[in-house]
Image (cartoon, grey):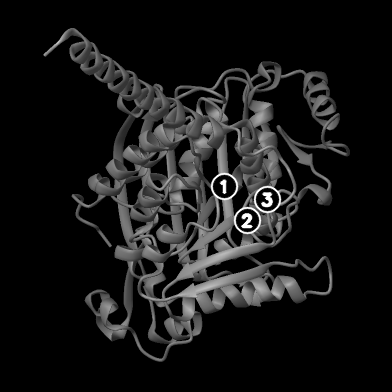
Amino acid sequence: MNNKKVQAVMYKQFLSIRWEILMVFLFFACSTQTVDEQKAAFTGAKNEVKLITLDPGHFHAALVQKTMYDQVDPLVHVFAPEGNDVQMHLQRIENYNSRAENPTHWREDVYRGDDYLEKLLATRPGNVVVISGNNKRKTEYISKMIGAGLNVLADKPMAINADNFELLKASFDEAAIQGVLLYDIMTERYEITITLQKALSQMPEVFGQLTTGSIEVPAVTKESVHHFFKYVSGKPLTRPPWYFDVTQQGEGIVDVTTHLVDMVQWECFPDQPIDYQTDIEVLVARRWPTMITAKQFSKSTGLSAYPDYLKKDIGKNNTLKVYANGDISYKIKGIHAKVSVVWNFQAPEGGGDTHFSIMRGSKSNLIISQGKEENYKPQLYIETVADVDEKDLQQAIDKLAQKYAGLKLQKSGNRWRVQIPDKYHIGHEAHFGQVTEKYLQYLVDGKLPGWEVPNMIAKYYTTTRALQIAETVKNPN
């Protein structure tokens, strides 16, 4: 081969190598740009958020849409199997659209079919997926949505067992790679008595320091009572029958306790990341059932008979055994905490779901009570356990009143009730809008606060680890 031919071949090889290098460079540049573009895709502009609702089976899915948001497109794409779950969801949205006061104007584009999940992933008509329904597949849904590069706003619980927990951890890792946000709906942070309890616990002149506590007398206790039959948006709530199957809904110890564990973390260690491997130690966990009669089941679901998948849980007198109750005693960053949840069928007259909480400080205990004495409305008390200057108490309330106008103190023995104007008691349903607004801002920011992801992981480790322990304990009931 003469020199000219050799030079020509070498030149072609050179061009080929340059082309390959350029393609590699462009590939990585485009990959980086894709993630950056995703993070910067949200600016707060009108209608830039396109919602997808996946398999809505819980009324919380509709509560996200009880109000409108400028940032969210009114057209929402729904993907679900045929059945009552999606029909009830759409009826709730229609109720919001047709109400007399502040009607919404959502438009629902609905795909029904057995291949609803595949259809969603093939078309991807939005950028934020709302997941609230049957918990059996929820963690799987989350994993697939994150893997597809979609942001996820998920109802609790995001995991109902140890296998789910491992998949959820992997989903958070994948979310970081994809540049998308995975977030759960923690409404209780927005309840005014809880907000003020947290604020007062950060005032050492009133609260002192959080005690260490013990397993017998925890430093912080959270208890909640819930009801299978209730009213939502002024109408009797129809529960799907699977709600009574803990293999689909999850046991109480991994469901509602998610909120309670979240509040322990959020109030006691604000803005601090929690490492589930070093900061959490589950000490004791218990579970016990609520017995539901056939008549109660029918009243709640509208069905005349139990479905086949519940027959495994039917006991004497045709009653249904639902493991909806549980408690967890654990240590978090060396502090003893206890959370417990109880499910009754229906609240007493004038009552509803209730919450009790106590944070024990070296100077005062901060107590939230919502019992009969409080007419089932949450009240916040400051109970002194050491010398506390009343002027310091008043100054603390005055400081909080700069943000929450109208706060006052009412003395009763060694207790003070924090009088909170009714305008701040906006109700559980309204908190879904507040959580959504916060999430929308995180989308604009392109990130969650640094402590949120490790603390979500710690939260679901606590609940799923507690279930593992509780299942090994013989139930005295």
Considering every residue shown, the one lying at the far top of the view is: 3
Corner quadrant of residue 328: top left
Residue that appears at 29% across and 23% down: 16
Which is nearer the eye, 142 or 382? 142
Which is nearer the eye, 419 or 198? 198
Q: Which residue is under mark 1?
A: 356
Question: Does 160 sit above or below residue 115?
Answer: above
The x and y percentages for residue 191 are: 67, 46
Residue that appears at 75% across and 53% down: 426
Of circles 2 and 3, the one toward us is 3
Q: Is residue 441 left or right of residue 256?
A: right
User: Upstream in the sequence, badge 3 or badge 1?
Assistant: 1
Dot 3 amino acid type: Pro
> Answer yes or no: do the residues labelled 1 and 2 have beta carbons within 8 Å?
yes
Q: Quick one: label 3, few (<14), some, or many (20+) residues within 10 Å?
A: some
Tell me how far mark 1 sits from mark 2, CA to CA: 8 Å
Considering every residue shown, the one lying at the far left of the view is: 1
Question: Does 428 sit above or below residue 167?
Answer: below
Dot 2 amino acid type: Gly
Dot 1 amino acid type: Phe
Q: Quick one: label 2, few (<14), some, or many (20+) residues within 10 Å?
A: some
User: Upstream in the sequence, badge 1 or badge 2?
Assistant: 1
The x and y percentages for residue 397 are: 80, 29
- Work out which quarter of the rendered image holds the C terminus and state it: bottom left
Q: Quick one: label 1, few (<14), some, or many (20+) residues within 10 Å?
A: some
Q: Which residue is under mark 2?
A: 371
Disc 3 element = loop
Q: Which labelled disc corresponds to residue 401?
A: none
User: Upstream in the sequence, badge 2 or badge 3?
Assistant: 2
Q: Which residue is under mark 3?
A: 378
